Image (cartoon, rainbow, N blue to C red):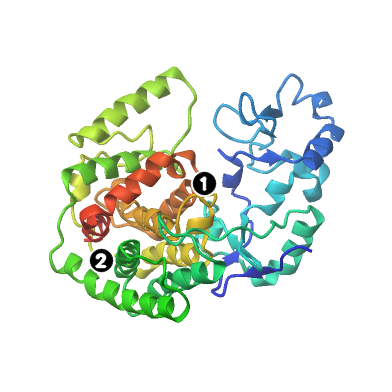
Amino acid sequence: MPLPIKTLPILERWDCHGCGICCRGAAVLLSETDLKRLRAQRWEKHPDFRGKKIIVRLGLFDRRFRLAHRKDGACVFQDADKLCRIHREFGYDAKPHVCRMAPLQMIPLENFVYVTLRRYCPSAAADKGRTLKEQLDEFRRLALANDAVPEPTSPPKLTRRHRRTWKDAMAVAGALENLMLDERYPLVRRLIHGLEFCRLLEGCRLKKIQGRRLAELLSVLQTSAVEAAGVFFENRQSPGRTAYRWFRQIALEYLRLHPDFLPETSWRERGRIFHAALAYARGKGRVPCFRMNFPPATFAELERPLGPLPDEVLQPLTRYFERATVSLRYAMFKGGRWSLTEGFQALALGFPVALWMLRFACGPRAPEAQDAVNVVMMLDRGETNASFVGLQHRWRTNSLMDDHQLSRLTAWYAR
């Protein structure tokens, strides 16, 4: 029997506003049902699609298929008005299942499935539309009709060394949730509370700590994490040289996920990426920005204090980090390979990246709400991007926890 589907205990809003952004750069995997439906639509006979590939393999030796892209990264079926050609010709139900589900995402836990929003969609990032709870019945119908409700999954590891039951995993996740939803503190402080909690938990020997003893330990660690965070604001220090170099490399990878980035598949573009990687490694001079409409900036200028951000700019960021924490997708999106502590560290790393990107995108002007929506879309795309789910990024995030470098980065860019 399929697992029950629930919305998050905190509000999420969304409606499709027809922007077409979800049709650009996304790999739309096709089920057997999708393939049969597309073949029955006989696109090869349509004058606009003769000689064009509409389906390609996901990889050279992969047996799975996806919708083809045009050279600019858009789906082969996206029209000039940004709307879907399949939808226009055959109706909503004729589209691939992934397209009909977007931007909804299911997170399987032990006894139920959370449905939440992917915030690569600008309407989801800005919380525009009806509540997700109002749309839950329709989503359930769609998921059940397509046999898309995931099976129960194994619990994530608590730390790099300890895997326990779902009950213990939910206890650790609950502690992180308590820290991240504590509105007595600003977002930057809550993230550092979470980071310090993860660092303390990684240092614990959990083998014989269970039940009530684990609950008591988590309570103590939450208090200790809040106390430990103060030092990063009393004396804000720039990150060390090695940590700063890693951070710049990570920022370059995120830059290519920003909605203003225009993908190009050419040898010239590969050359640009190579030269940009060298520039970001050095961290001196002008910052390459790949034809993006960002003001010219030097690496030194992007270290300047940003100043206090207005509520309308902070809100999209706050909603993104709160909902990613409550849904547990910071751990579950890593395919079960990352622990809860590692997943949260990778999530929190997105905050200094977002503030660095706001400096870059805005230049001398003050950031606005749309700028924050753009960086949230960028962060969300990173959650499933190959650059941010592999061993290299896992090693980088773990290394940044040494000597509190990630907490220092977070406090530094929040100046």
- Most foreground residue, 127 or 29: 29
Q: Which mark is residue 308?
A: 2
What's under tag 1, amino acid-wise? Thr
- Residue 384 is labelled as 1
| Residue at horizontal 66 percent and vertical 38 percent from the top | 78
How crowded is the residue under tag 2: few (<14 C-alpha within 10 Å), some, or many (20+)?
few
Camera-side residue of 131 and 59: 59
User: In the figure, residue 162 lies in which quadrant?
Assistant: bottom left
**In the image, is 385 to the left or to the right of 83?**
left
Image height of 226 relative to 385, above or below: below
Among the 4 quarters of the image, the one containing residue 61: top right
Please say whether residue 215 is visible from this viewpoint.
yes
Q: Is residue 172 left or right of residue 16?
A: left
Q: Is any part of residue 361 visible from this angle?
A: no
- Measured as percent of width and height from the top left, residue 233 is found at 18, 67
Image x and y of residue 130, in percent: 63, 69
Using the image, determine if residue 65 lies above or below residue 210. Answer: above
Q: Helix, strand, or loop for circle 2? A: loop
